[in-house]
Amino acid sequence: MTDAPPRKANRTGFLESDRVRTVDLPQDGRLLAITKSIESAMKAGQSAAIRRACADFFAATSQFYRVPNCGVRVLAARPLRVRENWATELFGDYAPETMLIRVWMRTAVRKEITSFGTFLSTLCHEFCHHLDYQQFGFPDSWHTRGFYERTATLYHHARGTPPKRLFWVPVAGGRWRIDWPHTNRGW
Ligand SMILES: [Zn+2]
């Protein structure tokens, strides 16, 4: 589900974020090599190796997009206290003022372990927040259709899976949600 469009002041940035549906991608397998090592470290339950591979992932993406490197903390479980004034996703967050990404391996309540796919998608999602501020220069990082499509582009490239076109349906308040049956069908 996308965020509702903001009031006047930030509308231009919001529309731009909604309009830009893709990101440039490295023309080599550098991200895939790193995500493979994240996957095998997760399978083996080696937290030091997971942390190292996540740091490699953000070093490689930050270098490719020519933005300052963001910090990363890989946490075992979701913190009980999450940042105020900042949207916290189920498995991660990003603080624009410190450029710090936090991701966690388990949800707070049900203690479920994150799957590799969800974990990688969280890394890509939080990194796209970083790009919104550091590359696009947006005053805020909205969850627009463009944001989700940029994230999906990066995710599929980094995972080595075919890109998937997202289909959207409008909902109340100028928001959109992904039509999953349509998206999974692909046409
Ligand atoms: Zn987000």
Image: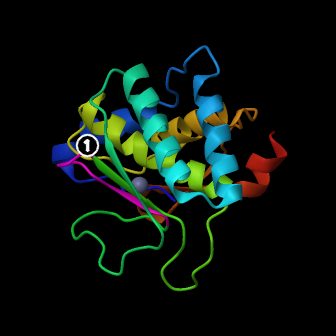
Q: How is the image coloured?
A: rainbow
Taking depth in this image into account, of 157 and 50 the one nearest to the observer is 50
Q: Quadrant of residue 63?
A: top left
Would residue 52 be seen by someone viewing this image from the given angle? Answer: yes
> What secondary structure is marked by label 1?
helix
Would residue 3 be seen by someone viewing this image from the given angle? Answer: no
Examine the structure image and report whether residue 178 is included in the region drawn in magenta: no
Taking depth in this image into account, of 128 and 120 the one nearest to the observer is 120
Q: Quadrant of residue 119?
A: bottom right
Quarter holding the C terminus is: top right
Q: Is residue 37 left or right of residue 139?
A: right
Instruction: Write the residue at 52% across / 28% down.
Output: 22
Examine the structure image and report whether residue 98 is included in the region drawn in magenta: yes
Q: Residue furthest top?
A: 27
What amino acid is found at the position of numbered circle 1 in the picture?
A: Arg
Instruction: Write the residue at 59% across / 34% down.
Output: 34
Q: Which residue is mark 1?
A: 11
Q: Residue furthest bottom?
A: 109
How many C-alpha atoms fall within 10 Å of the one at disc 1: few (<14), some, or many (≥20)?
few
In this figure, what is the number of numbered marks? Answer: 1
| Image location (x, y in percent) of residue 111 | 57, 81
| Image location (x, y in percent) of residue 177 | 57, 57
Q: Quadrant of ligand 1?
A: bottom left
| Image location (x, y in percent) of residue 165 | 69, 37
